[in-house]
Amino acid sequence: MPRRPNPLDPSSSPLALFGAELRFLRERARLSQDQAGSKANYSGSHIGSVERAEDMPLRDFAVKMDQVLDGDGILPRLWDGLLKRSVHPPWFDWPIHESAADLLRSFELALVYGLLQTEAYARALLRSDDQAVRARMERQEILRRSEPEPPYLVCVLDESVLWREVGGPEVMREQLQHLVTVASDRISVQVLPFGLHGGVNGSFALATLDDQREVAFEETAARGITTGEPSVLRRLIERFESIRSRALPVDQSLDLIMRTAKERWS
């Protein structure tokens, strides 16, 4: 007997309203999640995650699913009216995925990844906004928790991050020393040497959750986008592995970080 779908509360968030409307259209069309997904080249699991307001869809998803489900334009209109602004805030719901992850992979083109920033470095970036700084520091608690186990974190930094001044020499020296100090069996920090590489399009992060779902956070010039869309995930996973294969090994990376702290910021 088919499992009855979980009830949705469309009033709980813009994403929940979009998901509820998507489910309504799909059930009206008498299609399963897998059937609807196959018609638009998406997995059934991604359809389900969007319906449950667990994944943020891209606009292309709204357009294709509306066409498949004969929505008469309702899904693109909902996306434009409700979700377009929801994906703009820099962190959106990314900390939720960070805290639920077993594995985090991050490539940073310009700045130290938020989970590895010192308070002084974050304060300089956030213009001394106490509330924003406190929120960023609280995100880092997942790396120190005992239950559940902290996620594994694999962070690759473009070498320019080590040279880009944030807050002055003292702040930079402390930040680079911190990167070396936090490196452990669970936290890997690598440096990608100067040069043209697959990460020049921007920073991004990947979270592997305990149920093996993948979620990505991709930065653009105007906003950050959190998504579980399979095509985006494949592209970013391939990009990360390409970048990491060109990065210095961990020991050499930590040596370079310490050398830069001494030669550039002392």
Image (cartoon, rainbow, N blue to C red):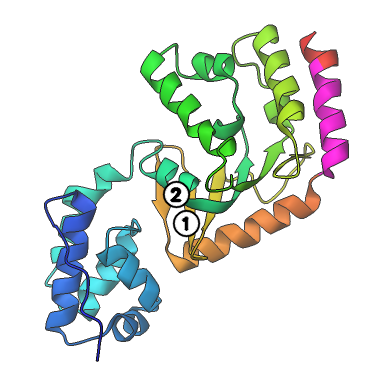
Residue 183: x, y in percent? 74, 35
- The residue shown at (26%, 67%) is 63
Query: Of callouts 1 and 2, which one flags the residue occurring earlier in the amino acid sequence?
Result: 2
- Side of 52 where 239 appears, left or right: right
Amino acid at circle 1: Val
User: In the image, is residue 16 above or below residue 45?
Assistant: above
Q: Quadrant of residue 239?
A: bottom right
252 in magenta: yes
In this view, the mark in front (1 or 2): 2
Looking at the rendering, the stretch of residues picked out in magenta corresponds to 248-261
Calculate the distance from the C-alpha at mark 1 to the C-alpha at mark 2: 7 Å
- How many other residues sit within 10 Å of disc 1, few (<14), some (14-19) or many (≥20)? many
Amino acid at circle 2: His
Quadrant where the N terminus lies?
bottom left
User: In the image, is residue 4 above or below residue 179?
Assistant: below
Residue at the far front in the pictured view: 147
Res. 129 in view: yes
- The residue shown at (75%, 44%) is 185
- How many other residues sit within 10 Å of disc 2, few (<14), some (14-19) or many (≥20)? many
Res. 202 in view: no
Q: Secondary structure at mark 2?
A: helix
Q: Which residue is mark 2?
A: 97
Q: Which residue is mark 1?
A: 215
Residue 213: x, y in percent? 48, 64
Residue 32: x, y in percent? 26, 84
Q: Main secondary structure of the magenta part?
A: helix
Q: Are marks 1 and 2 in contact (CB under 8 Å)?
A: yes
